[in-house]
Image: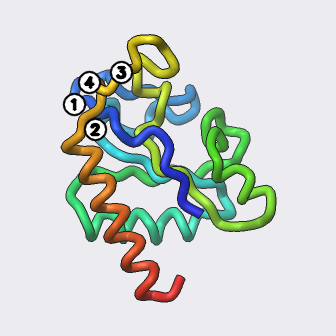
Amino acid sequence: MLSLDMIGYFSDESGSQRYPAQLRDNYPDQGNFIAFVGNLESKNFVRQCAILFRVAVSLPCQEAVFPSSVKGVDWSDHWSFWQEGYPALMVTDTALYRYPHYHRAEDTPDKIDYQRTAQVVEGMRGLLRALTIAGG
């Protein structure tokens, strides 16, 4: 299962990307990438999808595989698939860890980076096409 959740906000400014405390030293501080987030059981699926995404587009992509106890890892629709034992991941711009207007009145369409969002869509198209051709 692939859950796309918050895929439109990007920033090249240093310090624009935040993380839970235990992850701060392992990922970039610029919010200019899309993240593929999964639990430990979905590790191979996350890796496969990130590789296929990178083949399709040049937009930076980060893989994040953690126990469900890490804050934010299970904050989307993929969580319920994990509960049933399915490999699942979230494709995200990391929501409130990056986007200062998350769930606020100033969360308006002018904040979306449409060019990079289109790259995410194109990358997902390539990823899904490759998964379909490969049979899984």
Q: Quadrant of residue 123?
A: bottom left
Q: Amino acid at mark 3?
A: Thr
Q: Which residue was labeled with disc 4? A: 110
Badge 2 amino acid = Asn
The amino acid pointed to by label 1 is Asp
Residue projecting furthest to the top: 105
Between 60 and 102, which is closer to the camera in this rendering?
A: 102
- Residue 13 image-quadrant placement: top left
Report if the CB atoms under discs 1 and 2 are less than 8 Å apart. yes
Indicate which disc residue 108 carries: 3
Task: Give the foreground label among 1 and 3.
Answer: 3
How busy is the neighbourhood of tag 3: few (under 14 within 10 Å), some, or many (20 plus)? Answer: few
Q: Which residue is mark 1?
A: 12
Mark sitting on residue 32: 2
**Image side of residue 13 versus residue 97, left or right:** left
Distance in Å between CA atoms under marks 1 and 4? 17 Å
